[in-house]
Amino acid sequence: MNSTSDISSLIEPAHVEQAVLLIRGHRVMLDRDLAALYGVETKNLNKAVQRNLDRFPADFMFQLTADEANASRFQFGTLKRGQNIKYLPYAFTQEGVAMLSSVLRSSRAVQVNIAIMRVFVRLRETLALHKELAHKLAELERKIEGHDANIRTLFDAIRQLMRPPAKPGREIGFHIKESTVPYRVKTR
């Protein structure tokens, strides 16, 4: 087995999926999670990025605010209570993660990027599937909404037909009473 397949087998998609966060409306990964996947220290990853800042525009990478960093800290429990974040973390979008492979030039970085890209694609497909299902459900609800009123009207009409009349009505038509018949039929 070569080292490339060894590295890709160590990277579990579930672990990568858990590291993808939704911040400012973007799916991102934090520098600390990426550094752990790449097998480097966070400060070394950030130094490599700082040396190549022209490759990371604002839609590839952004630094979290103190509130965002604290929210992520409480969500994941990365620091003990009472400790403060020394440096605000960077968040990398899918494009920023892809650009990291050109900055970090190791075989592990390439394999990690491939695994991360597959996770981002799978998340995008899942999101598209959920949007499609939500759209179909909304369409079905709109169709059924009109049916509800029609079905309710139908049931009301059936219930009305099943009810006995409130008072017996006057008989309509010509009726002959047997006692008033004046003639008899002769039999042989």
Image (spheres, rainbow, N blue to C red):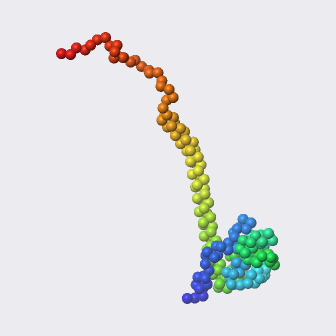
Q: Is residue 72 above or below residue 140?
A: below
Q: Is residue 2 left or right of residue 181?
A: right
Percent coordinates x, y for residue 122 in the rendering: 60, 70
Q: Is residue 180 left or right of residue 94?
A: left
Closer to us: 89 or 73:
73
Closer to us: 186 or 124:
186
Percent coordinates x, y for residue 52 in the rendering: 77, 80
Find residue 19 and report its image quarter.
Answer: bottom right
**Quadrant in the picture for the C terminus:** top left
| Residue ranking furthest to the top | 182
| Residue ranking furthest to the left | 188
Q: Is residue 170 above or below residue 118?
A: above
Across the whole image, how many numbered discs are drawn on residues? 0
Find residue 89 and report its image quarter.
Answer: bottom right
Residue positioned 61% across, 76% down in the render: 13
Percent coordinates x, y for residue 135 in the rendering: 60, 56
Residue positioned 62% across, 80% down in the render: 11
Res 95 visible: no
**Quadrant in the picture for the N terminus:** bottom right
Residue positioned 55% across, 44% down in the render: 147
Residue positioned 77% across, 72% down in the render: 69
Res 148 visible: yes
Percent coordinates x, y for residue 41 in the rendering: 73, 84
